[in-house]
Image (cartoon, rainbow, N blue to C red):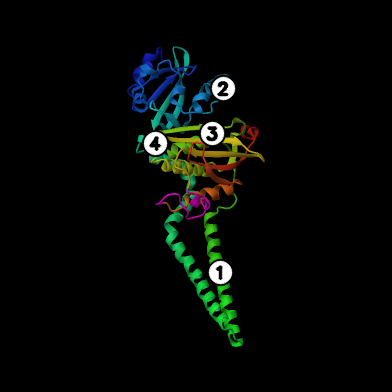
Amino acid sequence: MFRRIDELHALIDVVPDAMVVIDRTGAIRSFNKGAERIFGYSEEQLLGENVSVLMPSPDREAHDGYIARYLETGEKRIIGRGRVTTARRRNGDTFPIELGLGEVEIAGVLHFTGFIRDLSQMRESEKLMHSLQADLAHVSRISSMGSLANSIAHELNQPLTGIANYAGAAMDLLDDPSPEDLENLRHAVSECRNEALRAGDIIRRLRTFISRGDVELEIDSLRRIVNAATAIALVDGDGRDVDFSSQFASDCEWVLVVPVQIQQVLVNLIRNALEAMQDTDSKRIRVYSMCEGDGMVRVSVSDSGPGLDPRVAERLFHPFVSTKSSGMGLGLSICHTIVNAHGGKIWAGPSELGGTEFSFTLKRADLRDADG
């Protein structure tokens, strides 16, 4: 036990990672050199301030409630556990962090310590991201289709060429029909049918490759999934100069999902939004949820980019249709596959921020089921 806050401060100032000590009210009591470095504040600026100043919305508004619930119930939802989430620098940038929380008594009074690593500046973050994405093996397997595009095109091209050739021969026979050509015509049409069935079989094999069958859904917090996906999407530092915010409908926060797959959908949509805004002066991304009818939850990712080309929008979720000049056009198709497997739907439209808004629906879970 530490007798004074300065005793603890002398220890934590030599720690290379960021460490923040707060009291029961959320007020910052110690802010080490590592924290000063990654957040851009000096300790003098933050002493006595609520720690929520270091958080993006909506965690900023909800933080005091987290502490109050813990002090009232003793339920350790995140104390003693590490997690990946997001934080906010002094300049307003949102960035990914690895956060660990602990308890410490100082002069007989309970305090909380936060151990923070800035994932956007760590080479070791790649290893952490690999561990977070270990369960995304199937989604990665789907993504590898991009490198197989040429062989897929070659395989489909053979039956399609056969169909074209036999159809052309049949057309020639019909130009000057005679009884003796009837058998040849029947043969050409029959071969057209066989080649079409062959092309269909190739497509079915591709669908088998993509599909993992019935998904096993579990109850999880949409807030947690979005926070983790945001951290992964921003891990390369692409969130600089971006005003990022999230807002969740409290009445439908719990969803029935395969969490890592929905994380992959969100990572894809957030990164698409970041790339769309590369040449935009005012960069804003908003992720929000709202309750829908029929037991569904709608999740939306809005950006302030240039918006969608109407010619692309009509076929946006088809394979090999891309909004990017260098894209393979598989990312949104994969999102479509995942959302459909969850019993939802996905679509795109104009955003109130001036760019594009992608939305998808998920099955809503009963909070009582999550607690029990």
Callout 3 touching callout 2 (CB < 8 Å): no
Of mark 1 and mark 3, the one earlier in the sequence is 1
Of mark 2 and mark 4, the one earlier in the sequence is 2
Viewed as shown, does residue 154 lie left or right of 314? left
41 w.r.t. 157: above or below: above
Looking at the figure, which quarter contains the C terminus?
Answer: top right
Tell which of 91 and 51 is nearer to you: 91
Comparing marks 1 and 4, which lies closer to the viewer? Answer: 4
Inter-mark Cα distance, 1 to 2:
63 Å
Q: Residue at x 44, y 59 (%)?
A: 149
Inter-mark Cα distance, 4 to 3:
29 Å
Residue designated by label 4: 281
Callout 1 touching callout 2 (CB < 8 Å): no
Comparing marks 4 and 3, which lies closer to the viewer? Answer: 4
Local secondary structure at mark 1 = helix
Characterize the local packing of mark 3: few (<14), some (14-19) or many (20 or more) Cα atoms within 10 angstroms: many
Tell which of 325 and 258 is nearer to you: 325
Inter-mark Cα distance, 1 to 4:
50 Å
Callout 2 touching callout 4 (CB < 8 Å): no
Inter-mark Cα distance, 3 to 2:
17 Å
Residue 69's label in the rendered image is: 2
Q: Which residues are magenta?
A: 309-326
- Toward the right, the furthest residue is 294
User: At which x and y percent is residue 120?
Assistant: 38, 35
Residue designated by label 3: 223
Q: Residue at x 55, y 77 (%)?
A: 171
- Determine which quarter of the picture holds residue 119: top left
**Residue type, numbered disc 3:** Arg
